[in-house]
């Protein structure tokens, strides 16, 4: 069973043993780096992806102003640093976790009505995954740290 849960210290050891390749790190931040940032940025809300109670992935939901790089919509939240632990990749966990995202946000951030993110144009697999799970490419592009980014949006309310 796949679950999305609020980060707790009990997941720290599993995140320390979270080997992302240099290829992965070209497109996302390491969970430990994102946790450090969350200590500085109160708008960062770390989320752990569990598969059968094991840490299978990680991301941050950010309510801060960085979301305005992707949208003008006030009631949005930015999905950052999304990754799946290499041992859990290619097992449907990414798709399953993103499918759970709307209900998780409605439960913990009931005032939010859209999720935004940036995906590197070169990261074709991630772009395809986001499209399959309901994210829309609204045509906005911008330069990120590692190249051209595609701004994407998942509307939570019709």
Image (cartoon, grey):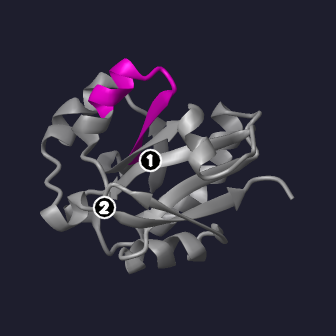
Q: Is residue 34 above or below residue 156?
A: above
Disc 2 target residue = 146
The answer to whether residue 95 of the structure is visible from this angle is yes
151 and 142: which is toward the camera: 142
Label 2 residue SS: loop
Measured as percent of width and height from the top left, residue 5 is found at 47, 38
Report crowding for label 2: few under 14, some 14 to 19, many 20 or more residues within 10 A (C-alpha).
few
The answer to whether residue 63 of the structure is visible from this angle is no
Q: Would you identify the image quadrant in which residue 144 lies?
A: bottom left
Residue 58 is labelled as none
Residue 45 forms part of the magenta stretch: yes
Residue 19 forms part of the magenta stretch: no
Report crowding for label 1: few under 14, some 14 to 19, many 20 or more residues within 10 A (C-alpha).
many
The residue furthest front is 143
Residue at point 14%, 62% (across, down)? 22
144 and 156: which is toward the camera: 144
Q: How far is the residue under mark 1 from the one under mark 2? A: 14 Å
Quadrant where the N terminus is found in the figure: bottom left
Q: How many marks?
A: 2
Residue at point 33%, 29% (across, down)? 37
Measured as percent of width and height from the top left, residue 2 is found at 45, 55
Residue at point 43%, 74% (across, down)? 121
Quadrant where the C terminus is found in the figure: bottom right
Q: Earlier in the sequence, mark 1 or mark 2?
A: 1
Badge 1 vs badge 2, beta-carbon distance below 8 Å: no
Residue 80 is labelled as 1
Measured as percent of width and height from the top left, residue 146 is found at 31, 61
Name the side, left or right, on which 107 lies relative to 69: right
Residue at point 75%, 38% (across, down)? 75
- Magenta region: 35-49
Measured as percent of width and height from the top left, residue 61 is found at 51, 39
Label 1 residue SS: strand
């Amino acid at each position: 069973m796949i679950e999305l849960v609020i980060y707790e210290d009990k997941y720290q050891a599993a995140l320390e043993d979270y080997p992302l390749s240099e290829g992965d790190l070209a497109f996302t931040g390491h969970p430990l780096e994102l946790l450090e940032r969350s200590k500085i940025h109160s708008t960062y809300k770390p989320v752990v992806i569990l598969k059968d109670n094991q840490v299978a992935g990680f991301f941050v939901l950010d309510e801060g102003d960085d979301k305005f790089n992707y949208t003008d919509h006030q009631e949005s939240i930015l999905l950052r640093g999304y990754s799946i632990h290499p041992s859990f990749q290619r097992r449907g966990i990414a798709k399953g976790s993103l499918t759970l995202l709307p209900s998780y946000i409605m439960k913990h951030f009931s005032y939010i009505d859209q999720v935004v993110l940036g995906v590197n144009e070169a990261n074709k697999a991630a772009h395809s995954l986001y499209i399959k799970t309901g994210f829309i490419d609204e045509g906005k592009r911008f330069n990120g740290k590692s190249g051209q980014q595609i701004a994407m949006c998942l509307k939570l309310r019709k």
